[in-house]
Amino acid sequence: MRILQLAHSLFSAGGVESYVRRLSAGLVARGHQLAVVGGDEPDAGWPPGLAGLHVVPGYGQFGAPREKAEAVLRLADEFRPEAVLIQEMNNYPLALELARRRPVVKYAHVDFTCASGGTRFRRRTRGTCLRRVGPACLWHYYADRCGPGWDPRWALWSYRRSTGALRTWRQLPRVLVASGFMRRLLLACGFADEQVEVLPLFVPEAEASPRAAEAAGAPEVLFVGRIMPEKGLDDLVRALPLVKAPCRLVVVGDGPARGAAEGLAARLGLAGRVSFAGWQQDVEPYWRRASLLVVPSLLLEPFGIVGLEAMARALPVVAYRSGGIPEWLEDGVTGRLVEPGDVAGLAAAVGALLADAALARKLGAAGQERQRARFGPERHLAALEKILTVR
């Protein structure tokens, strides 16, 4: 099958980009002919030797010039795909033009039904928002600090991008989402029941990651992700002094809130117990040294694929009960769930797993079994193939 895949970014900066790389390699391995259009140059994380890669800088941005879309349309006409799979891409005129020419399926990784860039996080109150996108969002952008800044141009741009996404993706016959949580959001915004299908994300199988022999000292609690207020790293730093078992926190990732998190750790006297590793191309050494992963996300996560990465390695996971996370993390069975914002509860859950090695191994093994049964590559790729062949 000839498949054209569109992704705004191919650089390995987050979960969506990781999924696009794995999916592309998986489709080619199953005999499909693939063309991938990206808006930036892929880094060393892109599968080596994968043919059919085209870079059109900035083509997927909201408001991109017409000539960017024309370049992609020419590529599509030359490739003659049997199906077009749109990942995260905000060039809506291009999407509609492709849909007039070819069968198009959209995979919605980010919540576009709110006007704050998909975070649904109120910085003023550190709470979430279930408001449907509308003109009132322009007020709440400032009143509740839903956006990352105070510039009114950004608020209007973000609002227009979200309303444009709703108008555009409603016109497609098939929209895929990673969780039932995301599906409910789309249905509440006027999408038809038969239009939205849940296709959970996947990660490859991996070997269990018991702490490496060289990981001396206190057990390591791992955080992996972009450091932003809504990702809850501050809560995890505040929880650390409440954990009775000895441990240290390792943060893999970077972002605009890193400086604030480092300052908080220093003020709490935790500088020696918290290390910031920055972005890492290879996270495997950190998985191998870790005793557990914590996902303290305060926003309504569309899915939370980093948890599957840990489960694949039989690492227990502690996470906030946020968005789609409970759809892969079952409290007391494959990990521990805590109510968002409950710092004491987060500390108790982490401490319980650190203090009870047998329980940690049990939850980790159950998580790995569930990842292999429900969130493996073959299951995902077979389901996607069936979706893309439906006319």
Image (cartoon, grey):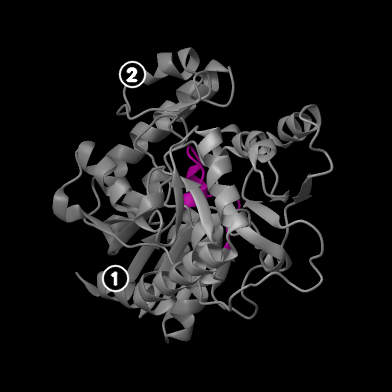
Q: CA distance from mark 1 to mark 2?
A: 36 Å
* The image quarter in which residue 17 lies: bottom right
Front residue of this view, candidates 67 and 241 = 241
Judge from the rendering whether residue 373 lies leftward or rightward of residue 186; answer left or right.
right
- Segment tinted magenta in the rendering: 55-69
Residue at left 47%, top 17%? 144
Element on which disc 2 rests: loop
Three-letter amino acid code of the residue under disc 1:
Leu
- State the predominant SS element of the stretch in magenta: loop
Q: Is residue 250 highlighted in magenta?
A: no
Q: Is residue 65 highlighted in magenta?
A: yes
Front residue of this view, candidates 259 and 195 = 259
Q: Residue 111: percent from the left, percent from the top?
A: 39, 42
Residue at left 46%, top 60%? 6
Q: Say the numbered circle drawn on residue 135.
A: 2
Q: Residue 237: percent from the left, percent from the top?
A: 67, 37
Residue at left 47%, top 12%? 143
Judge from the rendering whether residue 235 lies leftward or rightward of residue 28; answer left or right.
right
Three-letter amino acid code of the residue under disc 2:
Pro
Q: Is residue 178 visible?
A: no
Element on which disc 1 rests: helix
The first of marks 1 and 2 along the sequence is: 2
* The image quarter in which residue 101 lies: bottom left
Q: Is residue 390 visible?
A: yes
Residue bearing mark 1? 388
Question: Is 170 located above or below residue 53 in the figure?
Answer: above
